């Protein structure tokens, strides 16, 4: 197992991110421990040799271009794609949390809230009625995601050098 200094919080953000605005891919640099995000359009422009588009990128995207070129030239030995936590996995985390609630009235309300389309929004809105329980939820979810991060790191042969969860 390779020891590596990583920011677990950065990996968690990558795992929980969605592709709603710009399709992007997150990678862990297994040499440095750095987490990088690259837009799909940047990969497309590099692979298509679209120098004109790349030249017109804003300054903040220049490092993304360098990272994308490094990933494309790497062949999978240094950069490892960080998997997303899928919506059904997030749903299961909510279900496990709700199952542990002792107050049957609250438990039933929350189970009702997660039925059907819009479950995540309704859950968030409903649990906010109980501020202490809401705080417990966010702690529970953070710990569940942290475990996902640690399990994934172990699966790729990485042992966090020191565990820092920002």
Image (tube, grey):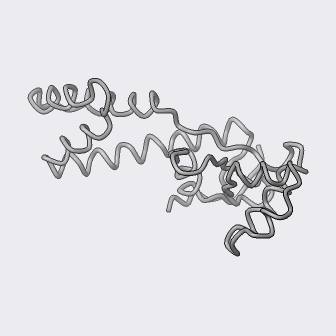
Count of marks, rendered view: 0
- In the rendered structure, the answer to whether residue 142 lies left or right of residue 42 reads left
* Position in image of residue 81 (x %, y %): 71, 43
**Closer to the camera, 160 or 120?**
120
* Position in image of residue 132 (x %, y %): 18, 51
**Closer to the camera, 40 or 159?**
40
Image quadrant of residue 52?
Answer: bottom right
- In the rendered structure, the answer to whether residue 102 lies left or right of residue 34 reads left
Residue that extends furthest to the front in the rendered view of this protein = 52
Q: Quadrant of the N terminus?
A: top right
* Position in image of residue 98 (x %, y %): 25, 31
* Position in image of residue 121 (x %, y %): 29, 41
**Closer to the camera, 64 or 2?**
64
Q: Residue at x 30, y 32 (%)?
A: 119
Image quadrant of residue 67?
Answer: bottom right
Q: Residue at x 26, y 24 (%)?
A: 115
- In the rendered structure, the answer to whether residue 65 lies left or right of residue 23 reads right
Q: Residue at x 15, y 25 (%)?
A: 108
Q: Residue at x 67, y 72 (%)?
A: 60
Eyeballing the image, is 72 above or below 148? below
Residue that extends furthest to the left in the rendered view of this protein = 105
Eyeballing the image, is 96 above or below 50? above
């Amino acid at each position: 197992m390779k020891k590596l200094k990583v920011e677990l919080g950065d990996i968690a953000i990558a795992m929980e991110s969605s592709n709603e605005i710009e399709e992007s891919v997150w990678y862990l640099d297994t040499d440095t421990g750095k987490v990088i995000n690259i837009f799909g359009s940047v990969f497309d422009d590099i692979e298509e040799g679209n120098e004109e588009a790349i030249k017109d990128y804003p300054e903040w995207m220049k490092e993304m271009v360098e990272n994308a070129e490094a990933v494309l030239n790497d062949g999978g030995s240094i950069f490892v794609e960080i998997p997303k936590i899928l919506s059904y996995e997030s749903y299961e985390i909510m279900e496990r949390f709700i199952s542990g609630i002792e107050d049957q009235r609250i438990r039933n309300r929350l189970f009702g809230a997660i039925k059907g389309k819009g479950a995540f929004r309704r859950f968030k809105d409903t649990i906010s009625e109980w501020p202490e329980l809401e705080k417990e939820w966010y702690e529970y979810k953070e710990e569940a995601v942290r475990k996902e991060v640690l399990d994934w790191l172990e699966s790729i042969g990485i042992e966090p050098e020191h565990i820092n969860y920002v």
